[in-house]
Amino acid sequence: EELDFPGPRTMRTAADWLRRQAGGEADDDRFLLFVDEFDPHEPFDTPSPWANRYDPAWDGPLLIWPPYAKRTVERGILTEREARHVRANYGSKLSMIDHWFGEVLDALDARGLWDNTLVIVCTDHGHYLGERDLFGKPGVPHFAPLAHIPLLIGGAGVTPGRYDHLTTTVDVHATLCDLFAVTPRHRTHGVSLLPALEDRGRPVREIALAGVFGRWVQLTDGRRKLARAPVSVDNLPLSLWSNRWSTMPVRNVPELRLPPPDRRARLDFMPGSDVPVIRQPFAPGDPLPFWALGMRPGDHHCYDLEDDPGELRNLTGSPLEDAMTEQLRVALRAVEAPEEQFARLGLT
């Protein structure tokens, strides 16, 4: 059977399901619909009428693969003109997704679901598009374009407006558990946002952690930010905990793969749970996972976001860095971080 409107399969299926099957008032009609839309994501390709919508003067092949690079224009990886064109293609993809997401919202309207439905819109990370002459997700700390991601919540009981609370993506899981009165079997680190939605003056958390495996570990309280780098030249000690050993290739570098586990690997358990994982240690001379390559020892960053929202003045060596480093030590203990992390960051 044909669906009601054209668009990507994910959005079409979600809107179609809402129109035909979404629940009603009864408890047994409650539903949770998770829509994982991969776009907007590179490649920044879009069909008509979205393709090249914001750069009509461009007359060459569309640049839909942004580089992952630092000092991108400075080193000639992209010209200023090419950088503008890449950003324009990203904008085209945003507009395309906004349009199709609107069809999902229209389905909520058609079923009259706003009075008993909570809608949460978020993303996993941002993407550099020329800020600080960065493109993609290169080896730099989480500056605001990558880490300050959108979170929109609307629906029953939510007063429209801006909520200036610190939060992080793990709080979405905690919010859903709270909403459906579910108690997770394993210890988690999220905090429900429902109290903040009911009372704007009630913050839900004081700090948030972020990071990418083998790179900086970051902490913020919303006003200040610390990015702590490894203190050793070989980015060790380091171990990888995973039950999904990725074989995903890296575009244009097919030979760069995640090193497979070897006979040093052992079965371990994620802190606070009985979920088994492979724990693979790395030693000097080992090939490291590609995320962990290129880290410079001691490349710490510390910013006062209130006085320096552009994160331009690195305050390492200041009392602020000392205070936030101790705060990071406490925060990592609270989430039961492995001992390798403390040694790697020089926090022992």
Image (tube, rainbow, N blue to C red):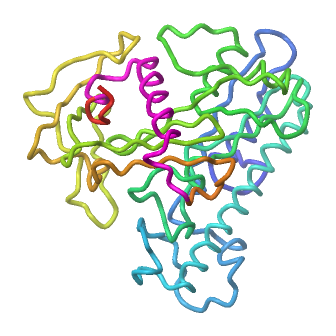
| Image quadrant occupied by the C terminus | top left
Q: Nearer the viewer, residue 317 or 217?
A: 317
Q: Decide: is 241 above or below 292.
A: above
* Image position, residue 97 (x, y; %): 69, 56
Q: Decide: is 109 above or below 340.
A: below
* Image position, residue 242 (x, y; %): 30, 29
Tell me if residue 207 is in the magenta stretch.
no
| Image quadrant occupied by the N terminus | top right
Q: Please name the predominant secondary structure of the magenta segment in the image.
A: helix
Tell me if residue 324 is in the magenta stretch.
yes
Q: Residue at x 87, y 15 (%)?
A: 25
Q: How many numbered circles does the render carry?
A: 0
The image quadrant that residue 190 belongs to is top right
Q: Nearer the viewer, residue 307 or 95?
A: 307
Q: Residue at x 15, y 26 (%)?
A: 265
Q: Decide: is 193 above or below 120.
A: above
Q: Is residue 248 left or right of residue 182?
A: left
Q: Is residue 185 left or right of residue 256?
A: right
* Image position, residue 98 (x, y; %): 75, 56
Q: Is residue 298 left or right of residue 80?
A: left
* Image position, residue 204 (x, y; %): 70, 22
Q: Nearer the viewer, residue 27 or 133?
A: 133
Q: Residue at x 76, y 20 (%)?
A: 194
Q: Which residues are magenta?
A: 313-342
Residue most extreme to the front:
319
